[in-house]
Image (tube, helix red, strand yellow):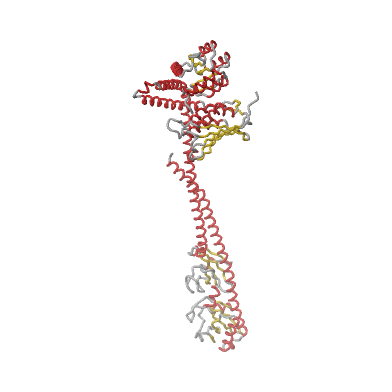
Amino acid sequence: MDKHLYSRLQTKIILLTLAVSFTPLLLLGVMIYRQFAAMYVEKIREQIHFRAESRADAVDLFLAERTAILGAIADTHSLAEMAREETLASCLAIMNARAGAFVDLGVIDQHGTQLAYVGPYDLAGKNYYEQPWFGQVMSRGVHISDVYLGFRRLPHFIIAVRRQEGQRNWVLRATIDPELFGRIVQVGQIGKTGDAFVVNREGILQTQPRHSGNILEPSPVRPTLFGKQTMTVDGALLGRPGVLYAGTWLKSADWLLVVSGDVEEDLAQLFSARTIQTLIIVGGMLAIVLTTIFTTRTLVRQMIQAETRLREMDAQLIQTDKLAALGKMAAGVAHEINNPLAVILQKTGWMRDLLEEEDLRDSPNFREFRDAVLKVEEHVERARKVVHDMLGYARRMEPRAEAIEVNRIIDQTVDILKNYARNNSIDIRTELDPALPPTTGDGAQIQQVILNLVNNAIDAIGRNGLIVIRSEHAGDAIRISVADNGPGIPEHLQRKVFDPFFTTKNTGKGTGLGLWISYTIIEKMGGTMTLQSKPGEGTTFTITLPIVPPPPQ
Amino acid sequence: MDQPNILVVDDEGDFLETLMKRLQRRNIPALGCSSGEEALQLIRTSPFDVVVLDIKMPGGMDGIQTLKEIKKVRPETEVILLTGHASIETGMEGMQSGAYDYLLKPILLENLLEKMAQALERRGGAAQRAQSERIRSLLPKG
């Protein structure tokens, strides 16, 4: 047996099985993950897109509301009224009560001079003529400024409206609380990592972003990338791979509202889901590996066993061939051996006869002579038995088909062995079913089998015992049993008794072929032969022969 | 010695000679011959109660043929077959041809005597029964 070959086969089977089972599993896993990730990215994209849109609306509403209220105040008051600080203060109070988020309020004449101011800063009398927003509001009538530092040196932005009163123009200007505005923008932040901020046309931050950068610093967002409609831009274009940016231009100001989502960060949650998935897959793989190894090992072990059995059977077949040749040879020489044996036995018998004579009895070597003669006889018997068994084997050819009566065969067989049994104080009893139907078979061979079984029984009992031979009609078959009350066969040997060359008899007494021959004879006739044995109680061999009705003569 | 009423037929000289000596030593009135033809001649001349006949005699007539002839001439003769071929088939054939029984060579004299005694008993007559008894008495008890 080539162990190496089997271990290689085992490895091959394991690898192949693993490859075949892992490939689709891994592909499926990767595919599911990719699809899931793509879906997730799409979800984030949609989410920030929607968020940017809705936030822009909210911010627009916020600014429009405040612009409107500022415009209404300007429209309903004259410059003279507004230039009074009391009026201005009450207006600021009303505006904050109605809308909120106004930090201060100032009235500026057409030359840029602040005529009146209410608010936390000391800005009264300042001139804004040089400030960029002043030019804008004078030309357009309404203006929302970018965030700038201004005189107060703090980032803020203003809403200004122009009022034409006769020939004179004046401007009502309010500062919006940048923190409050920032908070309104920041509502757009998604999850733990998302951001929402506003940039102007140059990409300068107008509100405080959550993560990187500060207000008035340039943001990574390039506003030129965004069109009129809400658009989503991949962060890879902006040097921020893994981040998605959605931007919406505000209607009320020249600002871009940006909502960003960190896909990679967000996918972290997915990664945790992936960990479970991976664990399940790894667990599954482990199970597959273990199962594969286990089944393959079992398989290979069974193959090895099968081969071993096959080899044993081969060996047995070769043995059988050898025996067949041996048997033929034995048949040829048996007669030639038995005749000399017959002569020898008569000669030794004659010697024993002569040894009975008195003068020889007195001879000092009388005992030696007698023992020698007995030994010769013993060994003649031994040789006879070997030849007999071998002949039995040699004759084990195709059974003849003749009409037979099993009961008669049993009777004849008992006749042959009666004396031998009686000499050993063994009683042979027959319980024959008188209604046994005739059947077809090889009478001589059946007789040989029964002879063999009874012979074995006698040998097994030794002295003083009983052998019962029964015949009975059992359905489609004839059952013949030979039971002895001998010592029985130990359980571990029961399976072996039908093996060729198996014998428990002393060397020279049995060839170990008898039961094997009997077994194969019965098998060839389509019957079965079994044994029941209990150590200490005896052994019963049971033959079942199918009934084949003989053709009418 | 009485007129021999037992005939032993075997072509193996040594066997026949020794067997005859042993029978004579036991005062069994037996005659020996070494072929089927010779045996038939003897039987035609005078009847024998029991014939012990070897089945395989390559020289001339074999045992079965001889048996059949004997049965033709004197059907009441009881024939005990001997065979060196431990074959039950030939034994059976012999039985079917009217032999009393058969023994496998090599034989123990005791077994042959036992068979002779049985055969004589079957022959019937008083003389034969007495002889049977006598032969039985020679056998070891048990």
**Residue A256 appears anywhere in the view:** no
How many numbered marks have been drawn onto this rendered protein structure? 0
Q: Residue furthest right?
A: A552
Up-down: is A520 above or below B25? below
Q: Position of residue A532 (x, y in %)?
A: 53, 38
Q: Position of residue A261 (x, y in %)?
A: 53, 66
Q: Position of residue B130 (x, y in %)?
A: 53, 20
**Residue A176 appears anywhere in the view:** yes
Q: Is residue A81 left or right of residue A494?
A: right
- Quadrant of the rendered structure where residue B125 is? top right
Q: Residue furthest left?
A: A364
Question: Which residue is more in the foreground, A502 or A361?
Answer: A361
Q: Quadrant of the N terminus of chain A?
A: top left
Up-down: is A533 above or below A514? below
Up-down: is A518 above or below B45? below
What's the residue at 53%, 51% (across, down)? A24
Q: Position of residue A244 (x, y in %)?
A: 52, 65
Q: Quadrant of the C terminus of chain A?
A: top right
Question: Which residue is more in the foreground, A200 or B43?
Answer: B43
- Quadrant of the rendered structure where residue B92 is? top right
Question: Which residue is more in the foreground, B97 or A246?
Answer: B97
